[in-house]
Image: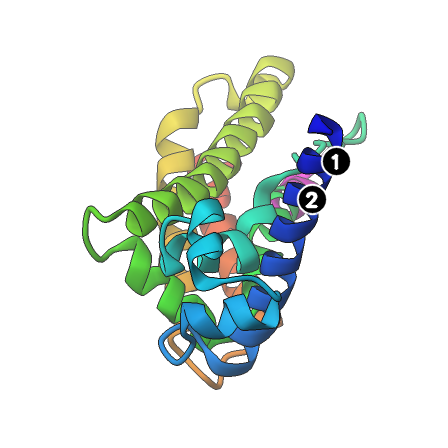
Amino acid sequence: MAGLRETKKKNTRKAILEYAEKIFKEKGYSKVKTSEIAKGANIAEGTLFNYFSTKGELFVQAVFVDFNLQTYQIRLPQQIDENILISEMVSIIDFYIKKMASVDKKLVREYFSIVFSTESSEALVARKSIFHMDEMIIQDSKQLLSQLKNEYEIIKEFDVDLAVEIIYGCVIKQFMNYIYSDNWEYFELIEEMKKEIQFVMHGNMLL
């Protein structure tokens, strides 16, 4: 019996998430009511709150939760040059942001409105999700540059922490520009990031 109850709970949660994702993407966050989601999942509204404490938490779990389940695997050939290094750095960033960037920009803006709103539970859940993605970008960037610093004499004096901090600042700035511009395409975002990373690398490390 316990096994059946657990299976039912998993199926109910799955149904809630699937319908919530569908309706959020169709209508946006603010226009969706939890009663509507509950009806679409064939449950009572009160039952929905047994699984998710707020609409904001459900929104994050349904639309953004699986953005950072995987980690990037750094791959470098034995012989590297500036272009290879920069391409690998861009690949790290692209790996972590491309799924969020694939979501409708209006939805992402609503997501950010939750992230930076209050100390409510939905805000905390949203922050945890996006901050984890940030941490993975920083961690992998440091790993890449530290690996290069250990192996290549030309960058022994390179300040990895400072470089990653500058690059991450560029990523945040350009990504926000992309999200709040209806006319900017994703490939343009990547190209702008690549230019700024190239400037940091070339100006500080490959003299």
Q: Are marks 1 and 2 in contact (CB under 8 Å)?
A: yes
Q: Is residue 167 visible?
A: no
Q: CA distance from mark 1 to mark 2?
A: 6 Å
Q: Tell me the amino acid under the disc marked 2.
A: Lys
Q: Tell me the amino acid under the disc marked 1.
A: Leu
Instruction: Give the number of callouts.
Output: 2
Residue, disc 2: 8
Residue at (42%, 68%) from the top-left corner? Answer: 34
Q: Is residue 53 visible?
A: yes
Q: Quadrant of the N terminus?
A: top right
Q: Is 100 part of what is drawn in magenta?
A: no
Residue at (49%, 42%) from the top-left corner? Answer: 133
Q: Is residue 30 above or below residue 66?
A: below
Q: Nearer the viewer, residue 9 or 81?
A: 9
* Applied colour scheme: rainbow
Instruction: Indicate the position of residue 177 as horizontal and vertical percent values.
Output: 38, 70
Q: Which residues are magenta?
A: 80-88
Instruction: Indicate the position of residue 55 as horizontal and vertical percent values.
Output: 39, 60
Residue, disc 1: 4
Q: Is residue 33 above or below residue 78?
A: below
Instruction: Indicate the position of residue 48 as horizontal and vertical percent values.
Output: 48, 55
Residue at (64%, 52%) from the top-left corner? Answer: 12
Q: Is 82 part of what is drawn in magenta?
A: yes
List the single residue furthest toward the top: 150
Main SS, magenta residues: helix
